[in-house]
Amino acid sequence: MHMSDALVSPTVFAVAGAASLTLLGAAIRKMQPANRLSHATDRYDDRIVPTMGAMGAFVFAAQMINFAIPGTGSSGHLIGGILLAAVLGPWAAFVTLCSVLLLQCLLFADGGFMALGCNILNMAALTCLVAYPLVFRPLMRHAASPARIFTASMLASTVGLCLGATAVTLETEWSGITALPFGRFLLFMLPIHLAIGIGEGLATGAVLCVLRHYKPELLADVRCRRPRTRFRPGRALAAIVLAALLIGGSFSWLASSQPDGLEWAIERTSGGNDAAPATDALHRTAATFQETTALLPDYDTSLAGLVGCGIILLAAWGGTQLLRAGRRQP
Amino acid sequence: MNDRLQTALYALERLEEEARRDSPLHRTDARAKLLVTTIFLATMLSVPLARLSEILLYALFPILTAAQGGMRYGPIFRRSLFVVPFVALVGIFNVFYARTPVFRIGPLTVTEGWIALLSMLLRGLLATQALLTMIGSTGIFSLCRGMQRLGIPRPFTTQLLFVYRYLHVMIDEALNMSRAREARSYGRRTFPLRVWAPLVGQLLIRTFDRAEQIHRAMLARGFDGRIPDCTGASTPWCRRDTLYLLGWSTALLATRLCYPVEKLTRLL
């Protein structure tokens, strides 16, 4: 799910980066209590940061231990968004996941640096800030049974991952990187991430059950009984819009292998597949202009360019090798 | 399992060691390196996919910076190959969808899709290599300080450093548990969920206990919620950094705006 730098265009990573930076700023502000002067809130502040650090490191370490998925030959691992949110609360979990993603990108080259904004939106924001409050929390109760914990984490993880997969598809499509039509790409991504989501849900549920058994006080964010919140139309509206987007995205695009309305109309009216080439002077100038500015107008020069570039690179690499050899000599 | 944990631990140590060496690139300010890497990535990623040869020219950046930092390019290249499967998985579809021929080498016709696939792979490789040279010549601590001085909020960078510091502790802990489990499981390799869940749950509980211990120890030593900037000292911005930033950013922007390879081949 980690997007590489190769899959995003400047516009997309700029927009996603700005959005995730804003979210990160909001999350940091939410974590810090409003009046920082009072002693009690200050203590809260400096205890949550080390705990978040430890949790982030835990997610890192836990991701490297795979478990066997029952019934299949494959294995899965924890991704951790829902688990972190259940233990730390959604905002702190979001900040923690951001730092985990940044470290994964820097230390293990997992996901790109420019694509970090996209990755934060796809993996951290959609699980901690969307799937957790909209799916997991409403399903949880005070002193929930293991079955309920399992169900809630399964549903939340699946929803989070499928939303993430949809976002990856959208971002790749908006970047204009792939020639694959949106619907097919989504069909390719969703089943994979549905399976991963089920694995992740199993893992999250299992760990949460263990926590509930041994150290129930850790599930602070789930256990504490909230005052019954009254129905908030904004939240419901967001959920409905999200569901509509998801459903619309998955189904309406499937049908688009048929020519769309405009294409159909053109075909009908012109009687052919394509508009006839225009012959007047303006169009001809435009056509020659397009030819000169086209990306690869002439294959000979582009092949030559490739070869020349390769030679330059080889020369540069050879030069650095020579330099190294020269440095080693004395 | 153990292999992965050990590899990760080893990679972390190697990185620290690499960052502690000395070279012109190591002496450059972290902020300058961060900015130049960002400019490199932004310019390289904005070149259209069809201009493969222009993207190829950008490979000069990782090669030259690696040389400047006294790092060998081979291992960096090999480590960057890690991204190939992920990019290829998405890029391979272009081959089937974009079939317009672009040029031919002998009997081989190269289509737009292949050019796009190659460009994507190259973009992935180069982006990773640039990151690897940056992190290898800077280290996490200086980089975090650099980010902080560039305006990333302090709670985030502090938290990042905490994750990084606890990482060693946690991987060690996980390695211990996994080893103990392996010694008692008679060669069975996979973890069924029934075994995995208590194991990871225990790891989580231990993590919390450990974090609390460390936190108390830190409080006893006067920790006030922020990690003091002792590593890397407070390096001032000097002329070398300005030169590095200006030189690379002009070169990169010029390459992006002028498309030199195409111009040269036209001339020839």
Image: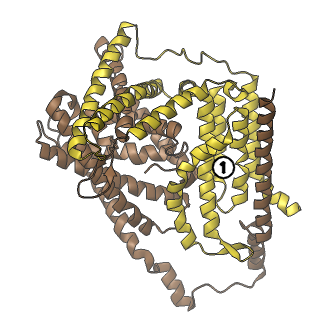
Disc 1: which chain? B
Look at chain A in the picture and name its colour. Answer: brown
Residue ID for mark 1: B44
Under circle 1, the secondary element is helix
Q: Residue at x 32, y 64 (%)?
A: A247
Would residue A255 appear left or right of A136 to someone viewing this image?
A: right
Q: Compared to B265, does A274 lie above or below?
A: below
Q: Which chain is yellow?
A: B
Q: Quadrant of the N terminus of chain B?
A: top left
Q: Number of labelled discs?
A: 1
Coordinates of residue A37 in the picture (x, y in percent): 35, 13
* Residue closest to the far top: B221
Q: Compared to A226, does A79 lie above or below?
A: below
Q: Nearer the viewer, residue A212 or A246?
A: A212
Coordinates of residue A168 in the picture (x, y in percent): 44, 55
Q: Compared to B234, does A261 lie above or below?
A: below
* Residue closest to the far bottom: A271
Q: Nearer the viewer, residue A293 or B50?
A: B50
Q: Quadrant of the C terminus of chain B?
A: bottom right
Q: Residue at x 77, y 79 (%)?
A: A284
Q: Nearer the viewer, residue A315 or A37?
A: A315
Coordinates of residue A8 in the picture (x, y in percent): 54, 53
Coordinates of residue A128 in the picture (x, y in percent): 33, 41
Instruction: Work out whether residue A51 can be spotted.
Output: yes
Residue type at tag 1: Met
